[in-house]
Amino acid sequence: MNQPLSHTDAQTVTLALIAVLLPFAAFVINFLVLGKSKATGWVSTLAILASAVLGITVFFKVWDKQVMHVQYLWFTIGTTKLYAGVLLNNLSVLLLALVSVIALPVHIYSTAYMNDDEGYGHYFRYLSFFCFSMLALVVVDNLMLFYAFWELVGFSSYLLIGFWFTRDSAVIANKKAFIMNRIGDIGLLTAIIILFTQYHTFDIAALFGSDGLIVRSVITHGEWVGPVGHIPAVWQYVAFGGIFLAVAAKSAQFPLHTWLPDAMEGPTSVSALIHAATMVAAGVFLLGRAYALFTETELTILAFVGCFTAFMAATIALTQNDLKRILAYSTISQLGFMVMAMGVGAYASSLFHLATHAFFKCLLFLVAGIVIHQVKHIKDDNNLDIDPQNILHLGGLRKKLPLTFIAAIIGGLALIGLPLTSGYLSKDGILIQSFEWSEGRNIFFKLVPTFGLLNTWLTAFYVSRLIIKVFFGEFRLQKMNPHIKIHIGDGSWQYKLPLILLAVCCLFPLFSLNPLLYEDAWLFHGFFQINFLVRSNMYHTIIPALVNVLSIGVMYGAWMLYVKRNTWSVPQTGFLFRMSCNEWYIDKFYNRVIVKFVLILSDTLYWFDIKVVDGLVNLIQSIGIAFSKMAAWFDHYIIDGLLNLLAAVVQGIGDFARRFQRGKVQYYLYSMLLALIVVFILKILIWT
Amino acid sequence: MITLTHFMVVSAGLFCIGLFIIVSKKNAIQVLLGIELMLNAAILNMVAFSRYDRVNNGGQMFALFAIVLAAATTAVALAIILNVYRRYKTINPDEINQLKDQ
Amino acid sequence: MNILTLLIFAPILFGFIILLLPSSWRASFKYITLIATLLQLGISIWIYLNFKTGPTNAGINFVDEFQFVQKLPWIHLDLGSAGSMQIDYFVGIDGISVTLLVMTCLVMVIAAVASWEIKGNLKGFFALFLLLDMAVIGVFCALDFFLFYTFYELMLLPLYFLIGMWGGARREYAAIKFFLYTLFGSVFMLLVMVGLYLSVKDPVTGNHTFNMIYMMDQANYIQGSVFSVLSNATLLGMPARTVGFVVLFIAFAIKVPVVPLHTWLPDAHVEAPTPVSIILAGVLLKIGGYGIIRICMSLFPDVAHSGAFWLGLLGVISILYGAFNALAQRDLKRMIAYSSVSHMGFVLLGLASQTAEGVSGAVMQMVSHGFLSTMLFFLVGVVYNRVHNRDIYNFRGLGTLMPKYTVYIMIAFFASLGLPGFSAFIAEAFSLAGAFKSHSVNGLLPYWMAVCGSVGILLSAAYLLWTLQRMFFGKIALKGGDIWKNALTDLNTRETLTLLPLALMALALGLMPSLVFAKINDSVLALVEFLQIK
């Protein structure tokens, strides 16, 4: 169904395939051959290194040049043929390169970070498997395969969250993550089935392509009419709902976001790769893939949900004390930002933010990993009973971990979005476009950009708080326990190299040569809408300025609050504080209402099954037994009784008659006499 | 005067008494006595009816004959009873039920 | 010698050998049984490889298109003016049966290996086992209704004794419940079978016939007979064909099992010894599904069409109801039994859709569930054999204690909750796709059914993951303390060798669904077409 590929194209596709399959090969080798050996780490790392090189090669061959699509028949079901194939367009090669490049430093980092863990071999097995699934997810060309890898990344995330499976909190968290993701999965499955019913194909290129089937369908008179068929329009909305659920689950959007903070139970390097940089971005990637499907209203819903999620998560991040939890909520917030960007039509900006966010959030997690690792050393050396992730114990680490500190500053600034960082370029694009989007609509729509702005300041605050509490001031742990010995440092090159790599990637040159104008970023030119790049109105100037000036103000405020401690202090008892601290009570609500409801329902149904359905069977059994007992009684007493009565009568007569036959003369005589008398009496009676 | 009827009534009474003794008594000798009584009742009747045969006195003759016979049978019967008693230590006719061949 | 006949009767030969051997040789019985089942597996694989595909080999309603056919006169009675009675030994397979045959033979091998745990009265056990083996293979091959019925009933007898004699504490209750339930279904089936016999004439000989293929063709029905479409006869005030369909459906729905006729299943599973549980879940349930395809829907396509909504509804109810019930269980085996109810609901839903995707998905689900439930019950048997306890709450942290075992449990659990890469995913996805598509293709099922069905996938994740978390993860805590800890050794070689092929099969079918689809596709298309013509 495609025009034959030229030789070089075929080569490119093969390279992409190899890039995808290398981590899988590493997984297989680790699984079958290496077992628990330390070599597993290097096998996986080498595989991902090769993948990264191939990914970048493929990226340069495909980006902005042509779409490559190769597919082979997988199987036939009925008259439907399913193809398995590779679709390389700008979106997929961007992600291909991004994922493999980000995975590389994480692998290197992990070889040191997990070195002392007894599950070292398992860890790299799972990690390679994740990389394989994630890379495959971005290049597959078919919704069935997309779903398959969509779930496999969820599965590998399940394995890695529950990596320390003897910890109860970890296994509860991974169960929660998988089930939450399952909700999204059935949404995605439903959407895929609806699309299949409507268009009779699973092919992503044919469905969502620029002149694909979806573009050529319209909703009229309550029917969703496509080129090959039509179904009621409501199913278009359901399909959107399904995709939305999938996105909400994978990218941790409200209302399915609660698994992500809990997922921090996994190793920090995993959180960096999976739960910050790559897997959670898959939701946004799905939005990008399925963008053609959404109607205007549906996009608006996306914008509002994304905006709400971003705001909610940012407010929660303000008060958390767990280092990784703050970063997790920050991730949710940034993902909300990307979804909002998709909703307001900032397609390219959203993907741009996805790319930049992957780098700086990964960096921040790796920093957190180093901090936690070092604090754990202190804890183990001195037998302290503390939570190494609690930022309230930390402080002043900038002198002890200088490289980590610099990396944290770069990552933090990128997250806040100050100039010279990549975050500045991507974030401002989204804000500007959301303002442009709300232009000319009613006041209600202004909420989205307004909260977006507010959100950036909240981000500035919690990032400042985090960095200040960890790196500035004095080391509170030492203050509380003055005698403890502290031997910590940035660690070996396996820690340092990834930090340097990622930190460099967080700066502007990777994305745009002009550090101040996001419009110059090369990434935008790869995607179809480029009209917003014209600096047509004042937003393009005002907003970056406004955002940055106020952000710096907020950061200064945080500095004053936490380091100088000479300004106002936040009341820690207010309703808002409690709301934020308890994560808006959403998790509690789910546990108390939905989980409980399902459990009660299942108990009720089981009761119903035992008592009613099986009870009915048992009742039939009892009735049967009762009937048979009655029949037995009837048989015994009535039918058999009649026979016995007859027998008894006969026996009675016999007994009576026998008495005359006892062989006793006197009786014979007696009876003769009696007979005679009877005859005489009768004779007399007859005579008279 | 004493008519035939009176004789017959006496005879019937004797007969009945004899019969009653036979049927009811549990003692073989008493039963034998009953039999004698009945026999005597019959003899009495014969004697009474002999008035109608004054030429041959058949009734009287039979009566004598019967008395002799009765005496003989009684002797035999008493002998049997004696033997029975010896064997069974009882003369209750109800309990002597072993006459059949062993 | 016809290869199918050989396949059917090979086990019974070995059964005779076992019966003739003195009891002192009892140690050899399990090996004889294993050889019998392995031989069968070999034959079935040979059949699978030599099975011809293509539109001319579709089967379903054309006698000529069946393969490996053998037809011998069995019971022929000349009844004078009333014609002659004609019952044939008539076996043959098409695409629907061939995959199920291979699946059955593999499951039987596993069940034979699982029988190692049986300790008492080995001669009886293995003889009954092989008799059961013969009967189930016979059911999948029979094309004569009488023959089908004979095999179908023949299955009950060995199962009754296998559960009743080698089962758990409440085995008599379970065995009688199972026996009566199934008998209740099949007794009425007998009536319908006789009715069909009297309604149909063999176009070749002109006699009444039990040939199922002839029963599918309306031209073979005698005018005015009770089951003829044209005569519109009524039974008990309802159309005779509807009554016939419902009666047959109830018979097979009990086997599937479909809610609310499922309550024998948890009891039978819980009480049955492991090999019997494996056969029950792996093979017996599939006979229900197979019967619905081969008999209910094929003989009464018109009723299947008009009643599709109700079939689909029952399917959806089974999916959700089974899943919720599984969530409420604390006995591991009972939970898996309820999950079987849930998973078999997809079969019914797929079949009710009467689309190529749905029917293929349903057949795939039967094959896949055959492997997965076998694996699950075998795994439960492993723990139960070690400590004679299956309560989920009594275990914790088995992952540390039995790592290999946990790997297989995870494979089995994730495969049956529909993780892509394993067979159940393809099966469930296409059952649902078929069910959804049905409305726009033939208007049988409303759209919402597929959506409700997909919730079952979510729930299956919930109960399986809960069990994983509760039993296998966390710190070791066992009710039986150190005694259990010592008893719970990891999988031995025999167990690993049993589980590995199952896991590999589930994986192979998930990665290469064409292993099944390529063989069944023509038959499924022919069936769908046949159902549409009515």
Image (cartoon, rainbow, N blue to C red):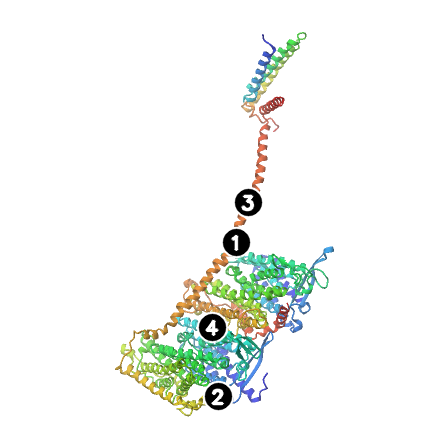
Is the residue under label 4 in contact with that under label 3 (CB below 8 Å)?
Answer: no
Compute the Cα span from label 1 to label 3: 20 Å
Chain under numbered label 4: A
User: Judging from the image, what secondary structure is the residue with disc 1 in?
Assistant: helix
- Which residue type does callout 1 highlight? Gln
**Which of the marked residues, 2 or 4, is nearer the chain's N terminus?**
4
Three-letter amino acid code at disc 3? Phe
Position of A440 with respect to C343 (left or right) is: left
Instruction: Tell me, for residue A621, which label it has, or none.
Output: 1
Q: In what element is the residue under mark 4?
A: helix
Q: Amino acid at mark 4?
A: Arg
Q: Where is residue A65? Give x, y as percent.
A: 52, 89
For discs 2 and 4, the disc positioned in front in the rendered view: 2
**Residue name at image x 71 percent, y 60 percent:** C207
Residue holding disc 4? A182
**Circles 3 and 4 on the same subunit:** yes
Residue A79 versus residue A503: which sits nearer the camera? A79
| Residue placed furthest toward the bottom | A513
Residue B2 image offset from top left, x and y in percent: 58, 8
What residue is at 59 percent from the left and 86 percent from the top?
A3
